[in-house]
Amino acid sequence: MKHDVHTMSHLKTRTLCFSTLIATLILFVDAPQSVFAQEDSGNFFEGFAKPLRNLTADGGSEDIADSKTEQAPPPAVEELALDLLVSGQTHPSQQIDTELTNAEAIKDFARNRSQLGDILEEGKIDSDSMEVIRKSLEQLLYSLTVKEHQKSEESNKIYDLLYRYFVKKSGEDLPPIQRQRYREQVFSQMLPLMEEMLKQNYFVRLRIAILLSDLDLKIGDYRNNISPVPFRAAVDLALKTVASEDQPEAVKICCLRSLHKGLQYGDFSKVYRLQIVAVCIDQLLGKADNWWYQRELVKCLEVSDVDIDENGVPVVVHALAVVLSDPTRNKMVRSQAAHALGRVPISSGMRINFELLSYELLSFTISMAEERDDMISSYEGSQVPAAFMSHWGLCFGNVYLAYQPLDQQEKTNEVGLLQRTTRPGMNDHATQIKETYSRIHPFFSFLLNKNNFNTKFPEAMVTSGKKWLEEYPPSDFKVAPNTEALVNLNQKSQPEAAQTASR
């Protein structure tokens, strides 16, 4: 997938440690930065939440580069949509060509934009001001449906105007608390129109889904560790869209950014978190086709902060184990599930079968090692693609991080299976966790050596892992006593990573 330079510049990393790891891989194989951008961001569309902004003394935000009005990153949605269409995903919304306004609407907006800016910045709520806001919203949003705009630079300009005025300027001159209240009023005006737009043309839906995920009551500043405050109603609409049978997966992928931010930063009750988790698991285990969509669903589960459901079932751990153990799924998805298993809430009362999890982690690692070696053989006589290292390095790295914390903060929080199985009531299989880790770690270390870029793994490493798997099969294939056995589940078929750009 190709991304425009402006958009890619906003795909910033969340953590220094993982960025260092990725930089190491880039250095070793001279792979382009773009190869790693979507992986290193934690959630691909989270990049759109991180323009180069900083907070001002009064709690506002400014562009770090020039301290001028921040420009919204144009959504690189056409490429995403076309990728899915090329892979065979067609959708009825491609045939929708309804125009809700005409090309003159954007010109009408331009005549009143100065007045609109003053209204939004100052937080005016009188009836005349709210009418200007309503009319301006219709002019901009409906302009996205005009045919001559949809496949031109004009569409990006319209998106930029929506972001600049209704996301950036809303309540800009107000004190922090008042600003959040005012933004809620403005966003509440936007949502009914945006829901209507989610029934329009395929590409219009994509832009609306991305805009939806920017409706935060407080804009976050990751450089200063200031978290956003998600707008609950926007998350509600995103959840409804993801659960819908009538939306294409490209739109759902965009909406997952709203769910991810809501789960990570929102002050949500466990009941609401379980509702989001239920939709994500339903999509992941039964309905998701595209590997990218599956991976983003896994990332949402990782930050869900849900341990058990209302019946005491560890639904998140179970779903992640299903994905990890499914050989028909893309390796990027399975490795993300491995990464998540080291981070989701686990307590002794859940009675998690660490024997099974460690077995599946090692089994997955050995299967990847064998496939990688086979691929290297197939490249004999030709140059190995630069993206080859990034793909495998990320997959093996995610499995490594199932056991180990990423940084000091995660170490303090006892992240990773090695630390978690030292807790009372969870250390029955600590020895097995250590033994599988001792066989997984060498594979990742091997890939960090630049001389091993196109070299097969030592046969002894693979043999050792396979022998251990033969000698120590799990005694129980249930993730917990109150879950179904993994071997009895209908695993979902999914094309392998040969169809991804990383090969």
Image: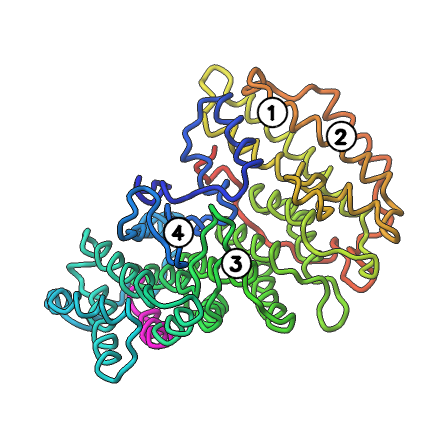
Q: Which mark is residue 260?
A: 3
Q: Up-down: is 429 above or below 146?
A: above
Q: Which mark is residue 403?
A: none
Asked whether the beta carbons under mark 1 and mark 3 sit within 8 Å of each other, the answer is no
Q: Earlier in the sequence, mark 1 or mark 2?
A: 2
Asked whether the beta carbons under mark 1 and mark 4 sit within 8 Å of each other, the answer is no
Q: Main secondary structure of the magenta part?
A: helix
Mark 4–mark 2 Cα distance, whole angstroms, equals 38 Å
Would you say 430 lies left or right of 82 here?
right
Camera-side mark, 1 or 4: 4
Look at mark 1 in the image and give the residue it sits on: 447
Look at mark 2 in the image and give the residue it sits on: 439
Looking at the image, what colour scheme do you see? rainbow
Q: Amino acid at mark 4?
A: Phe
Q: Position of residue 356 (x, y in %)?
A: 79, 47
Q: Amino acid at mark 2?
A: Arg
